[in-house]
């Protein structure tokens, strides 16, 4: 399961409205190869749901994760930070054994 914090939920709603995405569009969270630690997170609005996708809902936010990515993302919390140390979505992933300095890539 992937969950979101209140700050992430608020930012998702704000971006959805700014970019004119329909309310029924979900957030697709995935993992792709790359980055300095080997794996990178992918986050985007999406209207398609494949038969093999897993779907979650937390705080009214629909989240879709492909079957391969859920192995890396189970238990992950999506947060949003707008502090001095950086602005953007952050993944709090209990499966990551290490992350890069920018927090955009990880290894298991």
Image (spheres, rainbow, N blue to C red):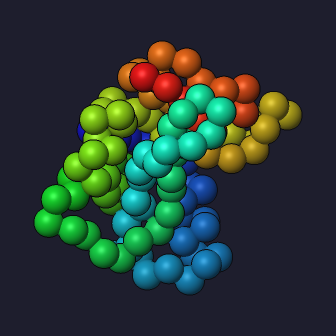
At 54% from the left edge and 71% from the top edge, which residue is drawn? 16
Asked if residue 60 is positioned above or below residue 91 in the image, the reply reads: below
Q: Quadrant of residue 64?
A: bottom left
User: Position of 88 compared to 107: left or right?
Assistant: right
The quarter of the picture where the C terminus appears is top left
Q: Is residue 69 left or right of residue 91?
A: left
Which quadrant is the N terminus positioned in? top left
Q: Nearer the viewer, residue 48 or 32?
A: 32
* Image quadrant in which you'd find residue 22: bottom left
Q: Can the viewer see residue 5? A: no
Horizontal side of residue 1 vs 37, given as left or right: left
- Residue 19 seen by the camera: yes
* Residue 99 against residue 31 in the figure, above or below: above
**107 or 95: nearer the viewer:** 107
Q: Is residue 19 above or below residue 86?
A: below
Tell me residue 63's x, y (percent): 34, 55
Residue 18, horizontal then vertical, whole percent: 64, 76
Depicted 87 relative to depicted 48: above or below = above
- Could you tell me residue 75's position as x and y percent? 33, 30
Tell me where residue 42 appears, x and y as whole percent.
51, 52
Q: Residue furthest left?
A: 51
Question: What residue appears at the point 37 percent right and 66 percent down from the top-left corner?
Answer: 26
Could you tell me which residue is drawn at 43 percent across and 46 percent down?
31
Q: Residue at x 65, y 33 (%)?
A: 36
């Amino acid at each position: 399961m992937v969950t979101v914090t209140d700050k992430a939920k608020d930012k998702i709603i704000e971006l959805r409205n700014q970019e004119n995405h329909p309310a029924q569009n979900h957030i697709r969270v995935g993992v792709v190869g790359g980055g300095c630690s080997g794996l990178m997170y992918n986050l985007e609005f999406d209207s398609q749901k494949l038969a093999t996708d897993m779907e979650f809902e937390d705080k009214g936010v629909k989240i879709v994760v492909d079957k391969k990515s859920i192995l890396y993302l189970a238990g992950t919390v999506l947060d949003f930070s707008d502090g001095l140390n950086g602005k953007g979505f952050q993944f709090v992933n209990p499966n990551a054994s290490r992350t890069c300095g920018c927090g955009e890539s990880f290894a298991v």
